[in-house]
Image: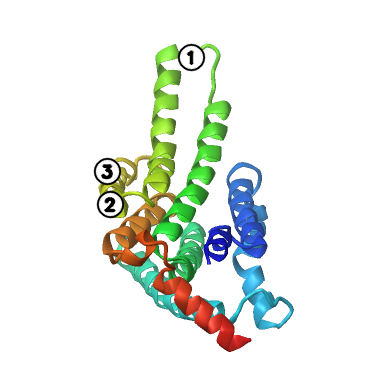
Amino acid sequence: MASRISVRTIPPLTGLIAGGLVVCGILLWMFVSRSLLFVAGLGAFGPGLLRELGWLRDHDEFQRQAAHRAGYHAYLIGGFAAILVLSGLEWSAELDESAEWIRFVLLLLWMSWMFSALLSYWGAQRTASLVLMTFGSFWAVFVLATLIGESNPDGEFSEAILGILAGSALVAAFFVPAWTAHRWPRITGIILLLVSAGFAVVFGRKGALQWSTVALTNTLLLVPLMVSGIALVRMKPAHDDEAGEPTHTEEDHEGHSLHGR
């Protein structure tokens, strides 16, 4: 049993490839060309399309049910977000009519599906840890690329140090809770929600940016923190885990797997 549980803590190869394509696609879109966003689409939607066509058979019955349920959640959240965006464009002249809103809705669709599917299969702690490490890695690359791109040999040393400290704090907000989620889940969840609120105040200002860009950026930044925090706060006490027994999710998965066989 212990070996099975330890194996499940490692994401499957398909998930790793899909996640890598999504991260690479977003980075290519941000730093190389916006026409390369399709790379992220290959990772976000490609595996699901292949599974529905029957060309990829890496899921058992439990995983398929979790994915289909997550698809319904994504439909609800993405559809509601699309209606709000369309209504907002009609109500307010301050909202820019930009293609960024389409990307914003697509991002919400994908993230809603991903979080729901992972929570159904992995549970709150493992999902929070995996999500925080994944998005933390993305923001680490983003911060590093930004610091290198904006580096100025003639600039003030204090500004460079301030930029490094701010970037380090941003990345630490993901990686530190990813480590503490397994040890102090409730406390970590509360801290994540507080950090999300603080980031919303700091990064939620429009400034010289368009509202669509602010919404897209804050979705990538705040949603992983907020969802992980809510999942950890709402998590039921796992007495079985402390005794070395599998969680309910793992037991259900085993039952569905045996039933499927």
Amino acid bearing label 1:
Gly
- Which quadrant of the rendered structure holds the C terminus? bottom right
Q: Position of residue 229 (x, y in %)?
A: 32, 55
Find the distance from the CA under tag 2 to the CA under tag 3: 9 Å
10 Å neighbourhood of mark 1: few (<14), some, or many (≥20)?
few
Q: Is residue 212 visible?
A: no
Find the distance from the CA under tag 3 to the CA under tag 1: 29 Å
Q: Taking 71 as reference, is 246 above or below it?
A: above
Residue ID for mark 2: 193
Q: Earlier in the sequence, mark 2 or mark 3?
A: 2
Residue ID for mark 3: 198
**Nearest the eye: 39 or 132:** 132
Residue ID for mark 1: 155
Q: Is residue 107 left or right of residue 41?
A: left
Amino acid bearing label 3:
Gly
Q: Is residue 108 visible?
A: yes
